[in-house]
Image: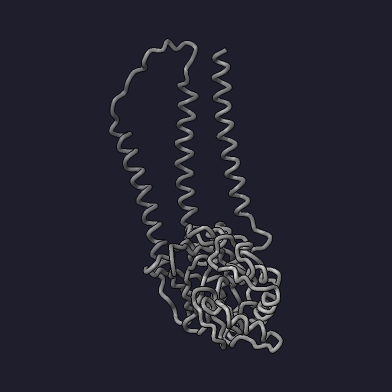
Amino acid sequence: MKRSEQTRSRAGKVLGIAFLLAGFLIAATVCAADPAGPSQIPNIFKPDSTPADSIFRLSKLVLVITSIIFVVVFSLIAYATAKFRKSDADDGSEPPQVYGSNQVELAWTVIPGLIVLVLFLATARVILSVQDAPKPPGAIEVIAVGHQYWWEYRYPELGVVTANELHVPVSDLQHPTPTFITLLSADTDHSFWVPRLAGKTDLIPNHPNHTWIDPHEAGLFLGQCAQYCGVQHAKMLLRVYVDSAADFDAWVQGQKRFAATNDAAAEGRRIFESTACINCHAVSGTVADGHFGPDLTHLMSRDTLAAGAALNTRENLRAWIQSPDSIKPGSLMPAMKLSDHDLDALTAYLETLR
């Protein structure tokens, strides 16, 4: 009876390990599969930029080496368990003790040391290639500033300031146009991570960091602040739009224009300029010159509100102004407490900012 129970126990453990391995393989297969929307899923198994590709290749090397170690160790354990399991004829006496083996001790010291050395050299090479990459002429320079809980993007050479949605040109072999990004923080620690374009790089107050990307195909690439930065950390999303050279130039020209004026929205503009909105937000061509919140000059040219927390529609914009906590609980934008008439007029004005 005891023998049968021991057999069932071992079979249960083996089955559990088999299910665990099968689950891991299924998860890896799902992540590695081509997504329906090729660039919208932050898939670490499908890099589309040189830094991300270097990290992916390093990850495959590490996975291969650690998988070999796992298979060898697991096989030895399984063999020892099956070969030397307790038998019915076992009298319970202690087996012969073997002390010392220079060959074995040398092997389990030298081999792990060589493995660590290989991984160290491979990792150091990738770190140096990513962090010390030379900046070629014609590269796009961007300053990314992390705020609680949104992203500010400044293009110092192009004279453009925007928020939450980063636009960069595609970089192909014929026209390499990498984007070099200086990472700053306005308050606490953040982390810039777009899995298909680059690895995680932290934004630390008073300590500028740098990263770069050279996307090989146009599209939308999603990312996330990967460092817990407060209650709305999970909704501090990253959207990187990789445009063709012509589309990027058109976007830059559009962003350089002053905010549109519309006589029909004059009342809403008056409300905007006479409330606390101008203390936090900037709109070119107006008295609004705040820097605590996002620049609103071309607000309606963006697809989302509140760092990707909601689509940029009239209904969501009105709700965001009326009660930011209804979309992003814990956000630092205060509710303006406007009357319905003033709220509608202000929303109508902001809709003209394209």
Q: State the residue at coordinates (59%, 86%).
A: 253
How many marks the image carries: the answer is 0
Residue 187: x, y in percent? 43, 67
Among the 4 quarters of the image, the one containing residue 103: top left
Q: State the residue at coordinates (57%, 38%).
A: 20
Q: Nearer the viewer, residue 338 or 152?
A: 338
Q: Is residue 60 above or below residue 15?
A: below
Q: Nearer the viewer, residue 275 or 333?
A: 275
The answer to whether residue 52 shows anywhere in this view is no
Residue 237: x, y in percent? 56, 64
Q: Is residue 201 above or below residue 70?
A: below
Residue 241: x, y in percent? 59, 72
Q: Quadrant of the N terminus?
A: top right
Position of residue 117 in the picture relative to residue 67 (left or right): left
Q: Nearer the viewer, residue 64 or 224?
A: 224
Q: Quadrant of the C terminus?
A: bottom right
Q: Nearer the viewer, residue 213 or 353?
A: 353
Position of residue 63 in the picture relative to residue 8 (left or right): left
Q: State the residue at coordinates (66%, 68%).
A: 319
Q: State the residue at coordinates (60%, 47%).
A: 27
